[in-house]
Image (tube, rainbow, N blue to C red):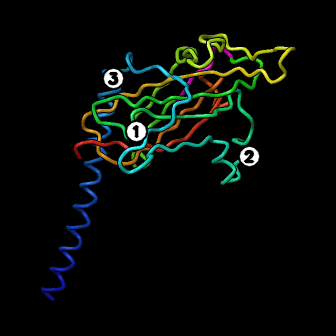
Amino acid sequence: NTSLCNKHFTRTMTSSFAKSKRALLLLLVYSAFIFSASSSSSSSSSVRLSTATSREGMFGKTFKWETCEDDAKKDDDIEDKEGKDIDLTSVALNPDPVRTGGTAKFILRGNVMADSIPTTSVIDVQILYQGVPLYTDTLSLCETIRADETDPSQPTKCPIERKTNDDDANATTVVTMEYDAAVPELAPSGEFEARLVGKRTEAATRGEVFCVKATLRVKGPF
């Protein structure tokens, strides 16, 4: 009986220690992200789209992305299957993997499908670790627009309007955006989730402008 009690006690203590260790790790990560966001909110609010692709590290590409529409097709979510004002053609991350104490630069590029993009549009950013939201940010989409290095004729600021060229029926308006998220020193190594949602107004509940989900890897001391 003493042996059975000892085994039960050991299993209980081991399980409790594992849960406590995971909870402590999530608390440390959350605290680090909150501190980083509060100390660098003014310097990490830019977004840029480009044709760059994820860099390959020793273990190959770690950054993966898909539009919310693509994800909705798997789950048969009718609401997210509707077309967006910006049709994203590429999303990249630099560096890949991300280093602790550095910056995660999200690079996006897409074709303008609507006649114009409202100047009230915003981008909601959310980063999660093991399903727990650790970092959130909201900024004006107009602040994120950058020049297209491959085509100077593309818009570099708001208002963004789709080209209408009678001589070229295939004329395309391409928008380039960039967003920098500060990564705290205490962030653990592992896989994180990111979600960037472009909305026509801050009060909107859906991403009418664009919506993208991504997974990224952070390489740090833990």
**Is there a contact, CB below 8 Å, between mark 2 and mark 3?**
no
Q: Which comes sooner in the sequence, label 1 or label 2?
A: 2
Residue highlighted by disc 2 = 78
Q: Quadrant of residue 198?
A: top right
Q: Secondary structure at mark 1?
A: loop
Structural crowding at the residue carrying mark 2, measured as other residues with C-alpha within 10 Å and reported as few (<14), some (14–19) or many (≥20): few
The span shown in magenta is 118-124
Callout 3, which amino acid?
Ser
Q: Quadrant of residue 204?
A: top right
Residue farthest toward the right in the current orientation of the protein: 166
Q: Secondary structure at mark 2?
A: helix
Disc 1 to disc 3, C-alpha distance: 24 Å
Residue highlighted by disc 1 = 96
Q: Which comes sooner in the sequence, label 2 or label 3?
A: 3
Instruction: Note whether 124 is above or below 163 in the view shown.
Output: below
Callout 1, which amino acid?
Asp
**Residue lying at 51% horizontally and 31% vertically, measured from the top left:** 52
Structural crowding at the residue carrying mark 1, measured as other residues with C-alpha within 10 Å and reported as few (<14), some (14–19) or many (≥20): many
Q: Secondary structure at mark 3?
A: helix
Numbered tag placed on residue 38 in the rendering: 3
Left or right: residue 138 versus residue 9 is right
Numbered tag placed on residue 25 in the rendering: none
Callout 2, which amino acid?
Ile
Residue farthest toward the bottom in the current orientation of the protein: 1
Residue 164, how many percent across, how many down?
81, 14
Residue 42, how many percent across, how many down?
38, 16
Q: Is residue 160 magenta?
A: no
